[in-house]
Amino acid sequence: MPIYGKVESPEDIRRINCIIRDEMLEVEDEAHLTELKKRSDYLCTLTHSPFWKKRFGEAIEELRKVAIEENRITVKEANIIARYKGFDKEYKPWRSDIDIEEQLRQIPAEVVEEITHATLSLEMSMEILETLRREFCAIRAAMVLCEDEECLKRLKRAVDILSVLPYMESFKEHFDEGLLGAIDALITKEKNRSVELANIVSEVEGWQSYFESIGEEDLGEQSAEEYLQKLLEEEEKSETYIPTEARYKGGGKVLWIVYYHPRRKREYAKRIYLPAEYRDLKMEGPGEFKNRFGNKVWGVKISYEMKIRPTVIHVRGKEIHLPERWVKKEKIVTLPKIAQNVRLLEERPKSAMDIA
């Protein structure tokens, strides 16, 4: 069994199962998936071993409870991946005679409540990375347990809530550039995993939703704080979030990045927001680009010039007048690496599905 780190507490059981489930997203054959499932089983077996009973004493009961719960989630994901990959295999959980199904059904709602209403205490050090990782792990575990499409949409919204943190001024001001870059890199990795799993669950269950990771380009001119508030308000209504037109001064314009998804065999369309007045619009890619934090992402780069109206700046009682001018702007729009026939259009084709 690969080394996933020591088991000192129930949280370590959760951490190891999260790693196992994330590795399941990368499997290419049934044998690898089966081996990963067995690693989760093994953790359950260890909770009955004399060595662990002696080592943990009375705490072994809590370890066993968490190991069984995590194993159920891991096995559910294994079966979802097996169906998605076309493997002729259905896995059974360790000690399937123990019934905790009702307990598992409560998890998605609990995770949504935790992300949207409970206080999230974040450390001002590298420890924040582990805290954020745990939150994303909990969301992905809940996705596996969803019994309807609305549940999946609400959990994707929870992913978006965490994903917007690096763009919030009130968040950024607490960290130096190095740590902020590390936070952005971790969130990018975790949100992409979460969206990948959400799309796998949606496809296996036969639901219509298709999801994409949000990025800075989704904010338009509104602040990240305003975007987050909108997400929370939409969660309160328990409705699917539909981005509104960007609030540029003087109005805004919506354009569409349209592409073909070869796995799903259909076209998808992703909104981008521009000011009402712009010129010299160009699209580069698809390819690898660096975002504002210096981290590499896959997608297209949209560049354009926007008109800035005459401005008056006051500095120590002195007025500085700036004339009307055109300023170059860029947006990096993230896309799946397998996206084909990527193009920028003024109208969404009727054949293209709007991305949730």
Image (cartoon, rainbow, N blue to C red):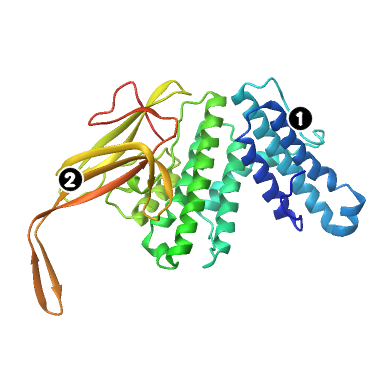
Report, in whole angstroms, how far the alpha carbon at label 2 lies from the one at label 1: 56 Å
Q: Quadrant of the C terminus?
A: top left
Between 112 and 170, the one lying in front of the other is: 170
Q: Is residue 181 above or below residue 156?
A: below
User: According to the image, label 2 marks what residue?
Assistant: 251
Left/right placement of residue 131 relative to residue 54 reads left
Q: Is residue 350 visible?
A: yes
Q: Is residue 245 visible?
A: no
Q: Position of residue 102 (x, y in %)?
A: 69, 38
Callout 2: 10 Å neighbours few (<14), some, many (20+)?
few
Q: Hey, which quadrant is residue 343 in on the image?
A: top left
Q: Hey, which quadrant is residue 240 in on the image?
A: top left
Q: Position of residue 48 (x, y in %)?
A: 88, 47
SS label for mark 2 = loop
Whether the residues at callouts 2 and 1 have beta carbons within 8 Å, the answer is no
Residue sitting at the far bottom: 316
Residue at 33% in and 36% down: 285
User: According to the image, label 1 marks what residue?
Assistant: 92
Q: Quadrant of the N terminus?
A: top right
Between 102 and 350, the one lying in front of the other is: 350
SS label for mark 1 = loop
Give the amino acid at mark 2: Gly
Give the amino acid at mark 1: Lys
Ranked by sequence position, the earlier of labels 2 and 1 is 1
Residue at 58% in and 42% down: 140
